[in-house]
Every structure is written in structure tokens, then in C-alpha cells.
Image (cartoon, grey):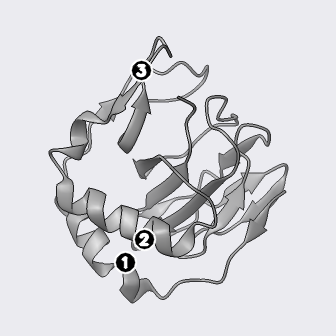
């Protein structure tokens, strides 16, 4: 099932965006998904290590405690489900994929000064700009349109298995 929640006033995200604008995002060059380009992203909360044998806290939780706190407060406000992790993308245009290691629904919302780069889920286009969208990323194939102008941060709230 896919559905959108009510849009959120962009002023709610000022503090989060200010923090994100100061971060030098790590470049992810190795990815277990075929066709994924290098991209800027990181995870806060819990992570499942590459060998998928154990769950641990994300390394960057300690580096960005204020962002971690703000995002968990936001998640508690807008997520109708329990989440363990938040994936944060900067200006990422994703190819078609599924999130095979996520459990249940994910919530995505994008913030920043940008246009384009909409989310396509099962061939239906959505605009997540300050608009929460909930769907099961482990079931539904999804990607972004390749027309990003500006700076876009995508916040994906999801649950991993332990």
C-alpha cells in the first residue's frame, strides 16, 4: 500500500536543513545494488552491517547528535510506524531498485531548495517535497526522475530486522 500524508510546513524543517547544509556528506562508491551511481548519503540510527549478521548503531550518530535528535523527534511526529533508521541522501537520483533489507513500510520526505527529482513508485510519480510518502520499499520498485535542480535532501525513515 502507498499513501501520502498531509504536507508539512517547510518552516518545520529549518533547523534540520541548517544542520544538513553544514555537513560534508560521505560519498558512497560501493553499493550492493547494480546500477547505483556514486552518491552522497549516510545513515543515522541503527545499521545492519554488510555481512548482514548483526545490527549496531550508526558510526555517525556520535558525530551528528543534534541531527539525530531532531530527526527522531520529526520521525515520532510524522511516522505512523516504528522506525529504527534514517537514510539521508543529498542530491541523489536513484535508479530503479527495491530496498530488500527494509522491513515493512518506509516514509520518505524531501526537503531543501530544489525542483524536480520526483519519486516514481510502480510507475506513478509522487512529489515528496515537504510531503511524506509511505510505501513498502522492499516490495515496490522505485526511482527518481532525472531532472533535479537545486539542493535536495531525502529523509527515509525505515525499520531494519535484528
For the N terminus, the quadrant is: bottom right
Mark 3 and mark 1 lie on one chain; the one further toward the N terminus is: 1
Neighbour tally class for label 3: few under 14, some 14-19, many 20 plus, Cα within 10 Å: few
Q: Which residue is mark 3?
A: 49
- Where residue 45 appears, x then y in whole percent? 37, 45
Q: Residue at x 62, y 37 (%)?
A: 102
Mark 3 and mark 2 lie on one chain; the one further toward the N terminus is: 3
Q: Which residue is mark 1?
A: 13
- Quarter occupied by residue 2: bottom right
Neighbour tally class for label 1: few under 14, some 14-19, many 20 plus, Cα within 10 Å: some
In the rendered image, is residue 101 in sight? yes
Query: In what element is the residue under mark 1?
Result: helix
Q: Residue at x 47, y 69 (%)?
A: 76
Mark 1 and mark 2 lie on one chain; the one further toward the N terminus is: 1
Front in this rendered view, residue 30 or 55: 55
Q: Which residue is mark 2?
A: 74
Q: Residue at x 40, y 74 (%)?
A: 113
Amino acid at each position: 500500500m502507498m499513501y501520502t500524508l498531509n504536507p508539512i510546513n517547510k518552516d518545520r524543517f529549518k533547523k534540520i536543513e541548517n544542520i544538513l547544509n553544514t555537513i560534508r556528506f560521505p560519498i558512497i562508491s560501493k553499493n550492493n545494488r547494480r546500477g547505483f551511481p556514486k552518491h552522497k548519503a549516510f545513515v543515522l540510527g541503527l545499521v545492519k552491517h554488510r555481512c548482514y549478521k548483526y545490527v549496531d548503531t550508526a558510526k555517525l550518530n556520535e558525530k551528528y547528535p543534534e541531527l539525530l535528535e531532531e530527526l527522531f523527534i520529526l520521525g515520532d511526529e510524522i511516522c505512523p510506524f516504528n522506525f529504527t533508521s534514517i537514510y539521508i541522501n543529498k542530491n541523489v537520483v536513484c535508479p530503479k531498485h527495491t530496498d530488500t533489507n527494509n522491513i515493512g513500510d518506509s516514509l520518505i520526505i524531501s526537503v531543501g531548495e530544489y525542483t524536480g527529482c520526483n519519486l516514481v513508485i510502480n510507475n506513478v510519480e509522487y512529489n515528496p517535497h515537504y510531503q511524506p510518502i509511505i510505501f513498502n520499499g522492499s516490495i515496490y520498485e522505485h526511482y527518481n526522475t532525472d531532472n533535479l535542480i537545486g539542493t535536495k535532501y531525502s529523509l527515509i525513515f525505515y525499520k531494519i530486522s535484528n
